[in-house]
Amino acid sequence: MTLVSELVAALDEERVRSGGLERALYNRDASIMEGRAGVVCFPLTTPEVQAVVKVAAAHGRAVVPRGAGTGLAGGAVPVGAEGHEPVVVVTTRMNRVLEVDAHNAVAWVQPGVLNLDLSRHVAPLGLHFAPDPSSQQACSIGGNVANNSGGPHCLAYGVTTAHVLAMDVVLADGVLVRLGGLEPEGLGYDLRGAFVGSEGTMGVAVAVAVRLTPLPPALRTLLIGFPTVEAAAETVTAVIGAGIIPAAMEMMDARITKAVEEYVHAGFPADAAAVLLIEVDGLEDGVAAAAAEVIELAQARGATSVRMAADAAERDLLWKGRKSAFGAVARIAPDYYLHDTVVPRTRLAEILARVYELADANGVAVMNVFHAGDGNLHPLFLFDRRRPGELDRVKAAGDQLIRVCIEAGGVLSGEHGIGLEKRDYMPLLFSPADLLAQDSLRDAFDPSRLFNPDKVIPSGSRCGDLQSVPPGVWI
């Protein structure tokens, strides 16, 4: 039997797509990279995922797990030579909340459950899922696990790994294993922690036990304008230095603030050089005191405007502005390259100045919106891929940005992952021994290298490795 016929037998004809146009839709994720999908499968159950993995392995085809496709580092881009393109396993139809234990604040969910849908599902119980990527209306829990995703409110609550207790995972031989558990202290190695953030290179998560967080009893949401980027950056450092850990602390420069205001009409100060969106939560008295201190620290550094959301509707509008930033850019340019690096908070103003310089030097426009509290930068380089040379200039600016951030004591990624985008930069941060250790861990899960080949670890990490990524992965 052929690969396609065996997959159809394992699922059904409607959920196995092999046509050229259908496969093309899954050649890329939300990054600016493109590969080639072989066959695209849409399983509904764990046994179906196991069957697909076994069929792919029997035919010598790699498997690329894929969630909603909102990843920005090329992690879900299928890579393979012509005639050996990977089988893409799309988990979006595995979208059921399996069980909610409100007493213990735990939910078992399938990987295709959308991030925001989970929080909406448990909100009547006074709970929510704390990690909240800007794409939370579209991104899936499985994708969050794959990339150890963050979000604005991860400053206080932590990224995805802090909220995942256990996972059921299909390995390369089709065997189902459980990593982690619901008990307070598990025995042995933290295999759950090793899997979270592995970007689909170790297996397919088919069920995830997530920790739910109580909705805060009180919160204050502040929008503060500043005359300079430096003043805003100094306020970020001052707030953390004062011992205040906001639930969220986001920064936007003048260019993106203006674009957002024209798009959302949320009342953002379009004349500010930078704005901070700061949220503090907890018990009422503590929240009121923290908000007052944040305002005092901001005004001491020249804040030109302070706005506190009066009610839930106004808070939602302010957050809509922040989380619609990338959509707002579409009114300005047809394409953008959203980067993801991390630098020490104390060097934010310096690095932002360098971002503007390198963008100007390469002749590309840039806007900045990012998680200032943990130094997680997200410059948006704007371009039009139809114009010759523009993508090359954008990639050159991105290359320089990575090197500047690493030299400043930063790291490659805060939440988007490594994928294809930053794979070949890994030696800037890790020694050969570090890379070998990471590669060996991957081998422990997937010795056959079935899952998501050529991602995260650069070629040459082992003696005799050869570069297997075909030309044309970047578009």
Image: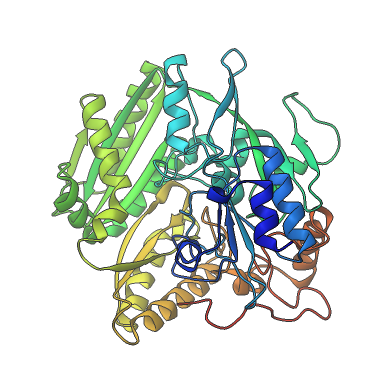
Q: Position of residue 146 (x, y in %)?
A: 61, 49
Whether 185 is drawn above or below 142: the answer is: above
Residue drawn 57% across the image and 48% down it: 42
Say whether residue 251 is left or right of residue 413: left
The quadrant of the rendering that contains the N terminus is bottom right
Outermost residue toward the right? 188
Say whether residue 123 is left or right of residue 191: left
Q: Position of residue 6 (x, y in %)?
A: 70, 55
Whether 293 is drawn above or below 425: the answer is: above
Q: Position of residue 347 (x, y in %)?
A: 44, 61
The quadrant where residue 255 appears: bottom left
Residue sitting nearer the eye, 423 or 42: 42
Q: Is residue 262 visible?
A: yes
Q: Is residue 63 visible?
A: no
Residue drawn 38% across the image and 31% down it: 280
Residue drawn 42% across the image and 16% down it: 124
The quadrant where residue 466 appears: bottom right
The quadrant of the rendering that contains the C terminus is bottom left
Residue drawn 61% across the image and 80% down it: 470
Whether 378 is drawn above or below 313: the answer is: below
The quadrant where residue 231 appears: bottom left
Residue sitting nearer the eye, 354 or 48: 48
Outermost residue toward the top? 103
Q: What scheme was used to colour the molecule? A: rainbow
Residue sitting nearer the eye, 455 or 302: 455
Whether 205 is drawn above or below 331: the answer is: above
Residue sitting nearer the eye, 407 or 10: 10
Q: Position of residue 263 (x, y in %)?
A: 18, 51
